């Protein structure tokens, strides 16, 4: 199934004149306690901005609803094109997958790669649900995300947690270099603890370079 979302029946990016200062574009903000995974105190590497439609996140949540009601996770890949130094997320690909209450394994990933390659898109992140858990990145999530961020430094992970009363979603990335080094050197599988980076920063943190863009047009490929 392929869905093309409002405001345009065609795949494009943003309407001319839209910038980060436009009232239709806003930085993603979060509320709720975040002492453990707050902003790193270490000087940041310069990352390119990423624009994503809030409606894309809402549509994914709706497509995942049946699984969520069964306490099963749902996952999808976020793909973007690069225009004038900004990534625009224009494609959500939901692959065939096997799910449990705390895991989701994509199948037939060659289909995901084909869609990205046909459109010259970058794999800038992924989105998945925690149907009955809080909004955080598990150790398995961190390993999954490492494979994205090692390819694209701007890659981010969206966690949708409908039962978390303090925060229904979060947009995260591994700290760099601390978190990236921890995951690079970790050979464990399954759920397991990770030590804190030697620089004193957390393993992962909220993204500060992701913006909600109400003009952004996107496609959804549901391959399940």
Image (cartoon, rainbow, N blue to C red):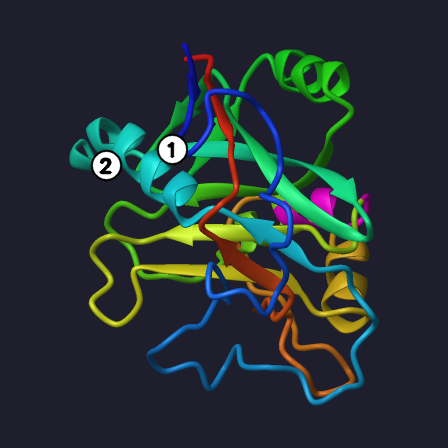
Magenta stretch? Answer: 145-151
63 vs 213, left or right, is: left
Dot 2: element: helix
Vertical relation: 31 (above or below) 108: below
Separation of marks 2 and 1 at Cα, in angstroms = 8 Å
Vertical relation: 207 (above or below) 17: below
- Count of picture labels: 2
Report the residue that reaches farthest toward the front. 17
- Dominant secondary structure, magenta: helix
Q: Position of residue 213 (x, y in %)?
A: 50, 53
Q: Which residue is mark 1?
A: 74
Q: Which residue is mark 2?
A: 68
Residue 186 found in image quarter: bottom right
Vertical relation: 116 (above or below) 62: above
Q: Position of residue 41 (x, y in %)?
A: 70, 89
44 vs 16, left or right, is: right
Dot 1: element: loop
10 Å crowding of disc 1: few (<14), some (14-19), many (20+): many
The residue lying at 42 percent from left, 39 percent from top is 56
65 vs 159, left or right, is: left
Vertical relation: 135 (above or below) 72: below
- Residue 51 visible within the image: yes
Q: Position of residue 148 (x, y in %)?
A: 71, 43
Sequence order check: which comes first, mark 2 or mark 1? 2
The residue lying at 61 percent from left, 71 percent from top is 208
User: Quadrant of the image for the C terminus?
Assistant: top left
Mark 2 near mark 1, Cβ–Cβ under 8 Å? yes
The residue lying at 77 percent from left, 62 percent from top is 180
């Amino acid at each position: 199934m392929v869905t093309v979302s409002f405001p345009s029946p065609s795949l494009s990016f943003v309407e001319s004149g839209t910038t980060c200062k436009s009232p239709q574009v806003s930085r993603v903000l979060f509320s709720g306690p975040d002492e453990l995974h707050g902003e790193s105190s270490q000087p940041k590497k310069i990352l390119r901005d990423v624009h994503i439609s809030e409606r894309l996140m809402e549509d994914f949540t709706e497509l995942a609803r049946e699984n969520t009601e069964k306490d099963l996770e749902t996952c999808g890949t976020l793909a973007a094109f690069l225009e004038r130094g900004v990534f625009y997320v224009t494609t959500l690909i939901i692959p065939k997958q096997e799910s449990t209450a705390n895991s989701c394994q994509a199948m037939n990933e060659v289909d995901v790669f084909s869609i990205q390659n046909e459109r010259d898109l970058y794999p800038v992140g992924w989105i998945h649900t925690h149907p009955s858990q809080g909004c955080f990145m598990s150790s398995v999530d961190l390993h999954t995300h490492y494979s994205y961020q090692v390819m694209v430094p701007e890659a981010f992970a969206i966690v949708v947690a409908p039962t978390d009363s303090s925060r229904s979603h979060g947009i995260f990335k591994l700290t760099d270099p601390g978190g990236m080094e921890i995951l690079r050197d970790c050979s464990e599988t399954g759920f397991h603890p990770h030590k804190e980076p030697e620089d004193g920063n957390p393993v992962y943190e909220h993204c500060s370079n992701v913006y909600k863009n109400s003009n952004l047009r996107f496609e959804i490929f549901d391959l399940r």
